[in-house]
Amino acid sequence: MFRKEGEASPVKEAVDELRGRVDTAVKSVVETFGVAGSAEIDRLQKRIQELEKRIAELTKGP
């Protein structure tokens, strides 16, 4: 429940890991599809923002 100062939360670590995976996927899409993949990139970035917002809501608590 209590964390030491400077200790990262498991949720933050999971979000950072997920962000890294998505960034890798986005780079792959750009390399594969070029300009045609820009719509997919925009969609993925929007989804990331939605997920980050949801995680922030869930971690706030009551």
Image (cartoon, rainbow, N blue to C red):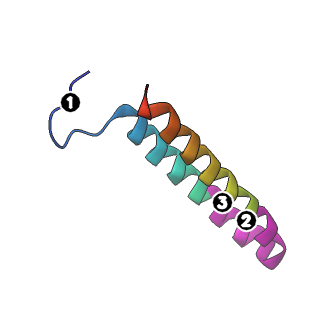
Q: Residue at x 72, y 64 (%)?
A: 41
- Residue 49: image location, x then y, percent: 60, 54
13 is higher (above) or lower (below) than 3: below
Residue type, label 2? Asp
Q: Which residues are magenta?
A: 25-41
Please identify the residue farthest to the left as the structure is shown: 5
- Figure quadrant of residue 3: top left
First reached walking from the N terminus: tag 1 or tag 2: 1
In the image, what residue type sits under mark 3? Gln
> Residue at image x 63%, y 66%?
27
Badge 3 is on which residue?
45
- Please give the name of the residue rendered at 71% of the width and 71% of the height, measured from the top-left corner: 31
Q: Residues within 10 Å of mark 2 (few under 14, many from 20)?
A: few
| Residue 19: image location, x then y, percent | 52, 51
Residue ranking furthest to the top: 1
Q: Is residue 22 above or below residue 59?
A: below
Q: Earlier in the sequence, mark 3 or mark 1?
A: 1
As drawn, which residue projects farthest toward the front?
62
Splitting the image into 4 quarters, where does residue 39 fall? bottom right
Callouts 3 and 2 close, C-beta under 8 Å: yes
> Marks 1 and 2, how far apart in space?
36 Å
Q: Is residue 33 magenta?
A: yes
Q: Secondary structure at mark 3?
A: helix
- What type of secondary structure mainly makes up the magenta span? helix
The residue that disc 1 covers is 3
Q: Which residue is mark 2?
A: 42
